[in-house]
Amino acid sequence: MTIEIAIILTPFIMAALIPLFYRRLQRSFIGWVVLVVPVSLFLILTTYIPHIANGKTVSHTFEWIPSFNINFTTYIDGLSLIFSLLITGVGSLVILYSNFYLSMKESLHHFYCYLLLFMGAMLGVVFSDNLMVLYAFWELTSVSSFLLIAFWHHRKASRAGARKSMTITVSGGVAMLVGFLMLYTMSGTFSIREIIADVNQISEHALFIPALVLILLGAFTKSAQFPFHIWLPDAMEAPTPVSAYLHSATMVKAGIYLVARFTPVFGGEMVWFWAVTGVGLMTLFWGSFNAVRQYDLKAILAFSTVSQLGLIMSLLGLGSAAVHLGYSTSSIIYTQATFAALFHLINHSTFKGALFMMVGIVDHEIGTRDIRRLGGLMSILPFTFTIALIGCFSMAGLPPFNGFLSKEMFFAAAVTITELDIFSIENIGIFIPIIAWVASILTFVYCVIIVSKTFFGKIKPDVAEKNPHEAPFGMLISPFVLIGLVITIFFFPNILGEYILRPAMASVYPTFPVAEMTPHIHAWHGFNIELYMTIGVIVLGLLLYRYMKYWIKIYRIFPQYWTLNAMYERIISSSENMSENMTKRYMNGNLMHYFIYIYISFVVIVAGTFLLLEAFTWNPSLDAPVENFELLLIFVMIFASFALLFAKSRITAVLLNGVLGYGIAFFFVIFRAPDLALTQLVVESVTTALYLLCFKYLAELKPEQSSKRVKVSNGLISILVGSTVTLIGLAVINYEKFESISTYFEDSYKLAGGKNIVNTILGDFRAFDTMLEVVVLFIAGLGVYTLIKLKAAKKGDADT
Amino acid sequence: MKINDVILRTVVKGVVFIILTLGVYLFFSGHNAPGGGFIGGLVLGSGIVLLYITYDLETVHRKMPFDFKKVAGLGVLLATGSAIGAIFFDAPFLSQTDAYFTFPVIGEKHLTTVTIFEAGVALTVIGTLVTIILSISEDE
Amino acid sequence: MESLIMILIGVLVTVGTYLILSRNLIRVILGTAVLSHAVHLLILTMGGLKKGVVPLLSQSEGPFTDALPQALILTAIVISFATTAFLLVLAYRTYKTNGSDDLQELRGMSDE
């Protein structure tokens, strides 16, 4: 067990331990105990930084299912280290924050259990080198996200949001799985590193583009890219710490991770460039456009997260152009987009995490998140106001905060790409900086909305009545740490660039020299086009905010019927209806029909196969000789079975069934099976007694009431089934393609120390069957007992 | 279920003894001759059921104070336990072993761990059989 | 012999199937019992009939009848006993609760 595997497993182990000890612990302690996990993991992971920064990687393989090429390979390089630091770092802050945010009355053990589950799964995603293992962890993040969104499961909106996120992300995940399998078919390996190493061999394969599209589907659904972003705003039903953690800082970045991870594989393709850039830009615009019109603070942040994820995604798309061009001194500039993407990824986690926590505090102290009911909180919540101000300025891209740096780099990358003349960028490339710029203006507008509507203006009377006050100190620690980072990163961005981002660049561009790809980040680089764009954003943004009431009407132009959400709802409800109607058609509650389905499929499939293969043969010459009394026995049994069909009373029927049973016992004697004969005799007697005992409570047999048509068709089906069995039996009985395994058991005395071969098979060779059979018998006995006693217990209810 | 019949009772007394002896014999002869856990259990179980049918519940219960559900449970435990037991001797799950031992009075005997497994099977069969029949007949 | 037994099995399966397709609960249970008789016989016949002596090493030197089908049937007999018992009790509880043993009448509501 290496440290890397231990890192992944620790959260899972802790999650498994919580149910065991939470009862013994004071409720307020659970969170503190849990906090130890991410903090220690974060500290352990920071020790990897120097090692990774030197350009080394850490990898360890644990053979899991080697026959399927599925190994539990952990791989830590620059890219996975960034994500793992985010996961554990933000995780620590979020758990610290939840200790103060969540009421002690909540089911805290569930909450922390799910949260740890998520943390482990997410670490698994970023550390796995094996595609199958990555996929398993990937889906586990969806599951834990589902559980966390539905944490307040008594609320309908929570359940709906959880279901929506699950449906969308898991469908994307399944598409991704198919893409992974295609990659496996092409390359013969599940290891990402090996696939990257022989990308030249597979890039001409016919499945290459389908695999690319399917894997992107997985990444886009997870990272809430247009048009799959609709789940993210609904996921805001989760407790705010969860939104801060999963739905802004970590889980939604898994898609980003995947795209970055696969850039060396697919980056050279035009489809990749336009899909990632185009979808990213569309998401960037659509998210910021929708954020402006929201009233709920969390909804604004949700759409803003969607938009920022689009920004990072589009940067990764822009950066993939460098993979296509290959290494040269002129192509190195295009890698800067990816650098900006990774840089903004970290920045976004810091300021968005702080903003979510800020909203949590407002919600916690004031009791509402609706900006129409908020206002003037600056004087009541001065610290929270500071957090909001810095977070929003950073998000809007203003100095002196880290968002400014990455946004400038984003503009620079968007402008630079227009100089290329590949992928038809020369024709439509000019739209890239334009969309980026428009979206940034809208981003600026909603940032102003968050700050001004919440903290400026007059306090609403119903808020003032409650006499709210600033949040407790503990709740402010986490957002202040994040805000501190926002400012620190602005002033010392190159430390981050040198130690964290540079090794990650090496993972995305394995064929490029690392030193040349790491820029020296400057806050000030003269009056250039990026700076003019930023100034334009501020001026236009302020103007738009000032005259909002004149243009806000454009949101009403688009008909509600055609929104993505409405379409999603229609698809879901119509597919539900369709499946219900279909099920109702054949699951009509009539047992007879179900049996008919089974029998007819049996006859059609089995007899049909035999007919097709012309396998019905009959060779009576090998038969054993027949004695007279055996003929008599067969005749008696056939007679008894027909008589059973026409039995008028149930006693007759049971006795006839007994005749059949004893007849079988006779056959067992004739066919040299003494154990069977004994057992059959006793069982038949006991069964008959059981029938008679139960008849005390059951009604007398009534003549069959079905119509003649039903009877005839049932008879036909029965004859078909019976003759199929006979014909197959006759065809199969002399079939000797394989050697019989029975001779093995004849050594039973030597192998098992018993001289009764049947019994040694039961007790020794095939004891598994016997053991499970005993269990079945026991369960049946318990079932009988429960059925009877349960009724006795409920009798009182039934009478009334 | 109370049947007042002296003849029946007298006959059953003898018959049940024979049945139970037969059951035990079948159980032990199983490894080398027809018989074994199932059939032994079934015969013993039906003998016990016969007792219950002839005498009333209380009388039999006084003489045999078993909860037959627990007997069945014990049987399952014994069967699975003997299976798991093999693991502790570094043998695969469900491995059985056998050996010859010499005892003071009865002489050399062939003992095998299958007997434990078979006893589990027999107890389960007895317990389940009696539980089923008893719970049906006790029902009002 | 095998051919004759196969025909007997076919008859038993036919009868069992017809009983299972009945509307009456008791007939359905009897049908399953008849069907399991047929299956036991089928498994035994598949091993070949009268091809050897009783599979007891203490009795003779062989050749022995195929012992594996016998072991499988022994398991099957006990399982079918257990299921029959369970079905019987289920039937009489159903009858007591719903007052009917007609499967047509016992159908679930259509809007369930």
Image: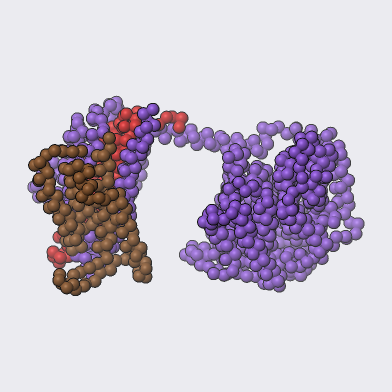
Q: In this view, does A573 lie above or below A71?
A: above
Q: Residue at x 39, y 31 (%)?
A: A797
Q: How far from the left and from the top, in percent, is residue C2?
A: 18, 50
Q: Is residue A238 above or below residue A130?
A: above
Residue A600 placement: quadrant: top left
Q: Which residue is drawn at 26% across and 51% down?
A: B66
- Side (left or right) of A168 relative to A546: left
Q: Chain B is drawn in which colour?
A: brown
Q: Chain C is drawn in which colour?
A: red
- Side (left or right) of A27 relative to C61: right
- Side (left or right) of A365 relative to C70: right
Res A558 seen here = yes
Front residue (pair A13, A180): A13
Q: Chain A is drawn in which colour?
A: purple
Q: Which residue is drawn at 80% across and 43% down?
A: A377
Q: Quadrant of the C terminus of chain A?
A: top left
Front residue (pair A390, A419): A390
Q: How far from the left and from the top, in percent, is residue A589?
A: 39, 33
Residue A586 placement: quadrant: top left
Q: How far from the left and from the top, in percent, is residue B72?
A: 29, 52
Q: Is residue C87 above or below residue A259?
A: above
- Side (left or right) of C60 relative to A767: left
Res A160 seen here = no
Q: Residue at x 71, y 67 (%)?
A: A503
Q: How far from the left and from the top, in percent, is residue A331?
A: 77, 63
Front residue (pair A268, B66): B66
Farthest-out residue, right: A527
